[in-house]
Image (spheres, rainbow, N blue to C red):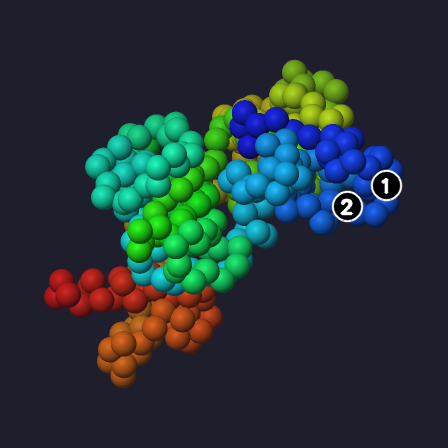
Amino acid sequence: MIPANRTTADTARAASLMGVSPGTFTNTRRWEKLAARPISRPGAKTRFWDDEQLLAAVEEREIPLITPAEPDAVYTVPVEEESVWELVRSFLVGYFTGSDSSAPVADGARIAPAVTAGFDRVEVFSVYAADDLPEAVEGAVVDVNVKLVAHDEKGAWPVDAQLRLEFTGGRWVVAGLEREDEGDLFDLEEAYLLVPEDRRPTISTWRTYATSTNRKNPRLTSIPENDTVVHGVKHWKRSTIRNWDQNDRFLLGEAKAGGRPVGVVETAPRPRTAPRNVLAAERRAKVRQMLAEDANVSPAAVGEALGVSTERGRQLLNEVKAAAAGE
């Protein structure tokens, strides 16, 4: 993925900055020694970087924060430090709703402008780092990925955001923010994953859609023309694929599949006997039992007992405790 409004650098540019020929750069796998990660899809034949990140890596400066191609592949270590969670939650609620926030922000922090600040509320579901949270000493820096859902009158919208946190003045502060943008660019394989799983065709069908030569034939389904070509590779904007999935695809010959459009919430609750509701009730009952046995049971222990993540264990604990407090 190429984040919106970023300049890319190809192998020739990377080799030039490192003072070697493109052949030497490729054959000796010099890119693996760079602190800047490629922003092209892992396994892609054509490899490229964010130019600003690449230049910083060669000059051994701090690598600017951008949204990586695969956040879940980069950020794999769960963050459980409560002070970090509270900082992240407070900052992002203010960022997405436009409300005042007490979250401290570093001087000169690079904060991507919010596309909209009209959300009603924000739920933070997980915080992951690329490595273990560093020791809280002056100048320590950590990048984290935050998964959240922002709610407005139209529905609930899942969002990924990357934050850079810095420890200064005896506390963690926000030093940078990058987030999903409708102008982000995706190659064909990456664009395929933008389609919600319950409406996603097979990968072979997707490739057929992409190679359709008659995009106006109502009997043939196709995806839109690519928005641009980067280093010889076709790319589509996030907005282009989302609009196709939500509005156009079923007007172009494809039988409508199940599942709700992105952002649309259910208009009526599922029956109590629905499998999903039964499972949720069983999980909450198990958490109540664990709390009765140990009032200080940890989110990690709950997650392990239920076969879910620590973050989901934390959510279940909070739900059960909130329900108990309201009784």
Is the N terminus in the top left, top right, bottom left or bottom right quadrant? top right
Give 308 or 283, whichever is nearer the viewer. Answer: 308
Residue that extends furthest to the bottom in the rendered view of this protein: 293
Helix or strand or loop: what does disc 1 sit on? helix
- Tag on residue 30? 2
Task: Give amino acid for label 1.
Answer: Thr
Q: Check contact, mark 2 vs mark 1: CB within 8 A.
A: yes
From where the camera sits, is residue 279 visible? no
**How many numbered marks does the figure carry?**
2
Seen from this angle, which residue lies furthest left? Answer: 327
Residue sitting at the far top: 216
Residue visible at 65% across and 16% down in the picture? 216
Quarter in which the C terminus is drawn: bottom left
Residue at 82 percent of width and 37 percent of height: 20
* x 31%, y 55%: residue: 170
Q: Is disc 2 placed on a helix, strand or loop?
A: helix
Where residue 238 sits, quadrant-wise, is top right
Name the kind of residue labelled 2 in the image.
Arg
Q: Measure the alpha-carbon separation of dots 2 and 1.
A: 8 Å
Q: Position of residue 43 (x, y in %)?
A: 73, 45
**Label drawn at residue 156:** none
Sort mark 1 into few (<14), some (14-19) or many (20+) by Cα contacts within 10 Å. few
* Residue depicted at 39% across the width and 46% down the height: 148
Q: Is residue 198 visible?
A: yes
Q: Which residue is mark 1?
A: 24
Report whether 101 appears left or right of 237.
left
Residue 114, image x, y percentages: 37, 30
